[in-house]
Image (cartoon, rainbow, N blue to C red):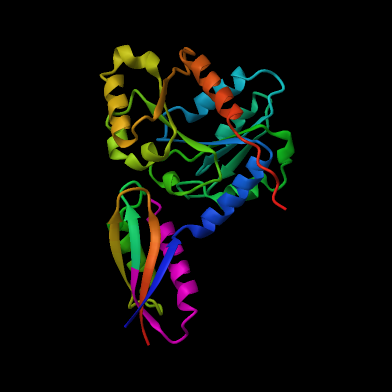
Amino acid sequence: MHEMGIATSVIEAVRVEAARRPGARVTKVGLRIGEFSGVDRDSLSFCFEALVKDTDLESAVLAIEDAARDELDLTYLEMEE
Amino acid sequence: MERVPLERKVLNENDRIAAALRDEFRKRGILALNFISSPGSGKTALLERTLAGFPPGTRVAVLTGDIQTDNDATRLARYGYPVRQITTAGACHLDARMVERSLADWDLDTLDILLIENVGNLVCPTSYDLGEDGKVVILSVTEGEDKPLKYPGIFFKAELMILNKIDLLPYVPFKPELAHENANRIHPGIEILEVSCTTGAGLDAWQRWLTNRRGSVIVTEPRR
């Protein structure tokens, strides 16, 4: 299982992007995950929730869009001021 | 609420390092292959046979990944080529940074072929680019013919499937043609070789494949 590592990479990427908008709170993280990416969606969501609990990203939820190949992309962030 | 569109790979830090490694390999014409299989499919045995089959003086080196122990490096070092163990201390796959660190003090100019044996696992190594030219997936006849369907990611990404342990076919219910069919459902046209690392069957074809593949590596100009 490498979803913990993938979730950590998602969070690192989200922090880099969120730092461009100081004061905004991340509410949703859009991901695109391909059928052949080797990543289990439920396991990734579980790891992500565990990692953001009690942090400034606690309000962020993952929104996962299916794709056909080996995509593993961060597609958008939703933020509130 | 504001939506900020992003289009970036989740693993872009890994991919950045992998791209730098690929540049280093390409400008020297090094063929780098990433071997992925379940534990026990015969990755190390295949590499032992492969090293033993090279003509003396072949400029080849091996990186071998395991969660614990340097047993594989010890096995592989007997053939006289440079071998280095990467112990991941729990991680279920190699990533590009581990390869970068392991190669840091190697003189890549002395190499034509780099064989990277990943941690035994059909899932996690699939996601991590190591800068290789291609992935090779190994399946053995003591496993199920449906592994390509159960673990489609690696069969989709691998350019070659090696079906190992064919000497055991008389004793197991494995149907090679079904494994071929399943691999082709996930990856139409995937190259397939059948070998036995015990009897040596099929290894000539594998060595020829490797030589041809090495010949297809195009040396790119160093970046200015």
Please give the count of numbered marks on the rendered protein. Answer: 0
Residue B69 visible in the snapshot: no
Residue at (50, 37) in percent of width and height: B134
- Would residue B108 appear left or right of B206 to someone viewing this image? right
Residue at (34, 23) in percent of width and height: B141
| x and y percentages locating residue B210 in the rendered image | 55, 25
Asked if residue A45 is positioned above or below residue B48 in the image, the reply reads below
Asked if residue B201 is positioned above or below residue B138 in the image, the reply reads above
- Viewer-closest of B136 and A53: B136
- Viewer-closest of A24 and B95: A24
| x and y percentages locating residue B125 in the rendered image | 45, 45
Residue at (35, 52) in percent of width and height: A39
- Would residue B92 appear left or right of B55 to someone viewing this image? left
Residue B157 visible in the snapshot: yes
Quadrant where the C terminus of chain A sits is bottom left
Is A25 part of what is drawn in magenta? yes
- Would residue B202 appear left or right of A44 to someone viewing this image? right
Asked if residue B168 is positioned above or below residue B15 in the image, the reply reads above
Asked if residue A45 is positioned above or below residue B125 in the image, the reply reads below
- Viewer-closest of B139 and A72: A72
Q: Quadrant of residue A58?
A: bottom left
Q: Quadrant of residue B162?
A: top left
| x and y percentages locating residue A72 in the rendered image | 39, 56
Residue at (31, 34) in percent of width and height: B148
| x and y percentages locating residue B25 in the rendered image | 64, 41
Q: What's drawn in magenta, residue-wise?
A: A1-29
- Viewer-closest of B215 and B9: B215
Is B179 part of what is drawn in magenta? no
